[in-house]
Image (cartoon, grey):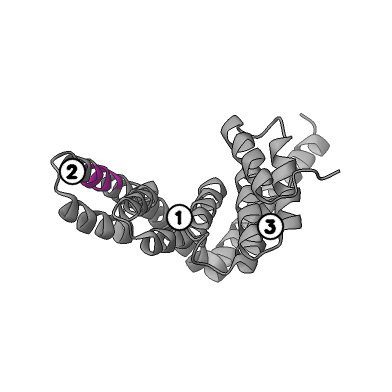
Amino acid sequence: MNEKQQHDAAADLLIKEVDEDLRHEQLTNLWKRHGVLVVGFGVAAVLAVAGWQGWRAWDGQQRKDSSLRFHEIASLLEQGKRDQAVDDLTRLAADGSGGYRLLANLRLAELRQQQGDLAAAAAIYRAVAADSSVASVYRDMALIRAGYLTLDSSDPAQLEKAMEPLAVESSSWRHSAREIQALAALRRGDKARAADLFGRLSEDAAAPEGMRTRAAEMLAVTGQADRG
């Protein structure tokens, strides 16, 4: 290796050493400035993972407990211990986990209806319908059930309006919603609107057969069966 090559090699080595020193100095400065944040982020990440795992374990246990409670309530009902079952369902509906609160509320509403307390059953259904944490399909179902239960007690005009979102063509509950609207219209004396709704239901091939039959019978009751 000639003198020039030796000089160039030495220069390259010096440059590398200087670059490494600069990088080291930059890293040292960055660590001094941001090291606490980096450590804090790392600790936060660890705590977040630990918290998530802890929550999952807790949630799983809560679901198991709620499942056990729900099955115990079913056993009470089989034994005819209705009052105790109602009390336990009320507690489960208040503090149960996830879907078991919904199941408890729906079962409790059914029991109230069987006991003849339609107002209490309807109130439970309305509470379910207003609960944004419940899936929309169950909320809509609860609103329909409350509508049927309060046909004789609620303001018919308000009931019709409450059914409007479910009476649209895209709704899975449109036939029930329209039947409730027709019955509410008949109750407030609007036979023309009732006849129109009953007539459309009776001719709707997509409606359940039993509902089409009822609608045809109610159309005759309105005295406006000839809608042409």
Q: Residue at x 49, y 66 (%)?
A: 153
Amino acid type of the residue tagged 1 in the rendering: Ala
Q: Is residue 69 magenta?
A: yes
In the rendered image, residue 110, in percent from the top left (x then y), is placed at: 35, 49
Q: Earlier in the sequence, mark 1 or mark 3?
A: 1
- Is residue 189 in view? yes
Name the mark on residue 72. 2
Prevailing SS of the magenta stretch: helix
Q: Mark 1 or mark 2, which has the lower sequence index?
A: 1
Report the side of 138 relative to 12 (left or right): left
Q: Of 219 and 26, which appears nearest the observer?
A: 219
Of residues 171 and 91, the one nearer the viewer is 171
Q: Is residue 86 above or below residue 200?
A: below
Image: magenta residue range: 63-70
Residue 115 lies, in percent from the top left, at: 28, 54
Q: Position of residue 149 (x, y in %)?
A: 47, 56
Q: Which residue is mark 3?
A: 164
Task: Say left or right for 129 vs 67.
Answer: right
Query: Label 2 amino acid?
Result: Glu
Q: Which mark is residue 200?
A: none
Q: Check disc 1 and report the residue beneath it.
A: 45
Quadrant (top left/top right/bottom left/bottom right) for the N terminus: top right
**Type of residue at label 3?**
Glu
Q: Against 53, is 159 above or below? A: below
